[in-house]
Structure formats: C-alpha cells, structure tokens
Image: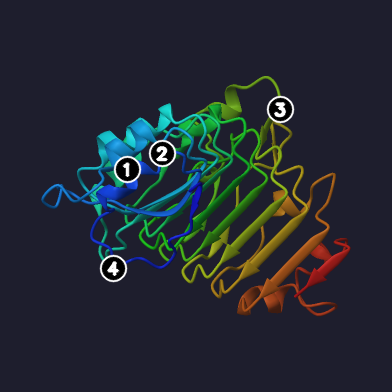
Amino acid sequence: MRHLMNYSTNSLSYMPKGMERLTHLRTLTEFHFHDGDYGGKACSLEYFLNNFRHIESLWIKGLAKGIEENIAQLKNNKNIRDLGLGFSGSDSMNKDDEAILEAFQPPPNLQELTIEYYGGPTMSSLRRMTSLTNLRSIPLLYCRKCLHLPPLGKLPSLETLYIKRMNSVREVGNEFLGVESGEASSSSSSIIYFPNLKTLELVFMPEWEVWDFGNEDDTCTIMPSLHSLKIYGCNKLKGLSKQILHQKAPLQNLVIFNCDILEEVYSKGKGDKWQDISHIPKKNV
C-alpha cells in the first residue's frame, strides 16, 4: 500500500502498531499524535518518521506537549513534499503550541505547509524557513489566537498564501514582511518581499482594521508578482495596502466580499477610494 487516505478519523486515540508494516507508504492523510504506547498497541511518531522514508504527503494531527523532539526530526525526511500540522485547537491561548512550532524543523524539500488550529500568540519562528527554496504554498487555518500574521515575506518561492480565521489580528504591517529592526534604513539596495507571491487570500478576520506597510520609498518592493487578491469577511478593514495596489505590474484580479467598509469605500464611481482600484482589469466588489 502506498496511499492511505484515512480522512475524518478524529476519534482515533492512536495509530495502530500494525501500520508499521506499511513502510512503502507515500501518502498518509492523518497521523494522530499520542503520548504513550497504549500497551504496545500504538505506532509512535518517532518510529514512523525514522522508518517511513518514502512518505511524501503527511498530516500530523493532535500536536501537543511532548512532540517537540519528534517534530524536530522532520528535517531528516527529505521526501516529504506536502506537510500538515494540526494542533489541538484549544479555546484559550496555548503557550505549548508556540514551543512546538519553535521546535519544528521543516523537511528540506517541502512544497506545501498547512498549519491549522494553532493556539499560540505568534508564529515568529516561521521566519527561519527562508532556506526552503521549493516551498510554494502555505494555508494557515483557524489560528485564532495569533496577534500578528507570520513573517513570511522573505520566502523566495512562495506563490500561494491562504489565511483563514486569524480572529485576533488587528493590524498587518512590517511584521508580515519579516522586516528586521533597522533593515530598510541600513540597506543600500532595494529589498523585495514576497518576490514570487501570485495569489493572496485573507478570509474571515473579524478584528482586522489596518493594512499598512509604512514604506512609501524605493528601498523595498512588496509582492511585485501578485496577480490575484481576495478578501472575504473582514468587516472592520478600512482599506487595502497602497503599496500593493500601486505596483508597477498591477493586480489582475481583485475580489472583495462581505467586507462592509471596503465595499463602501471602493464602490465604483461612489467610493472615496475607487480610483485606487479602477485600473485593475478584473474586480468584484
């Protein structure tokens, strides 16, 4: 067996030891992390990562305290292209989740990374992923306690970024770019953030109000390859980033849906900011 599509198995307490015989697996849609061996009946994550060297697509569910050493091992799994990290989804802020993400060492050839139900206040450790030259897609789902978007602007090959239900984010600015302190002012050449990002979707961020990178000069370029921008369910957002709207190679597709303020200010012929988007060929507001 090479592909085990065990979707919707959330009721599993552990992965059965019998799966240790499936060493040629390439796809496993859900590996449920567990603490303990359940009387010798369980296949441990440590065993799985050390012995399933052909695995290319893997989702690890139920990440919790105690997984740090295992999740650091992922850097040795060179065949993993698609990786999902599913946290426990606690209703309260979870510092354990932050420690787990800090310990995370991604596979070197990763192409897509999905993170869901993360309960920490920041994802600052993701700035270390700049060495992942094959990483092209990142969905971030239901990370409701994050106060800021993660610093992903220096990922060299990122093409698609999908963010849904980051309920605690109020402002998006330089922290999203991954700007270091004093970086822009000390650089003698132009810096490009999100150099290859083509598609950006920001969905259901109910507290988000401000989107401003604060860089109007020529020392940096932001998302020069962006083709499609979609904003859904962000009712408090007052305006789109001018730095993105005024690119030399402008957006080709803009969708704004269920965003009360944006729909008013960018309304065709009526809104105060209509001129900022009038040049975009395909728009749905």
**72, 212: nearer the viewer:** 72
Query: Can you tell which of label 4 and label 3 is closer to the viewer?
Result: 4
Dot 4 or dot 1: first in sequence order is 4
Q: Report the residue marked by disc 4.
A: 11
Quarter of the figure with the C terminus: bottom right
Whole-angstrom CA distance, mark 4 to mark 3, is 51 Å
Q: Are marks 2 and 1 in contact (CB under 8 Å)?
A: yes
Residue 73: image location, x then y, percent: 35, 31
Q: Is residue 240 above or below residue 41?
A: below
Picture disc at residue 20: 1
Residue 80: image location, x then y, percent: 50, 37
**Amino acid beneath label 1:** Glu
Q: Is residue 135 above or below residue 87?
A: above
Dot 3 or dot 2: first in sequence order is 2
Q: Report the residue marked by disc 2.
A: 23
Q: Are marks 1 and 3 in contact (CB under 8 Å)?
A: no
Q: Report the residue marked by disc 3.
A: 190
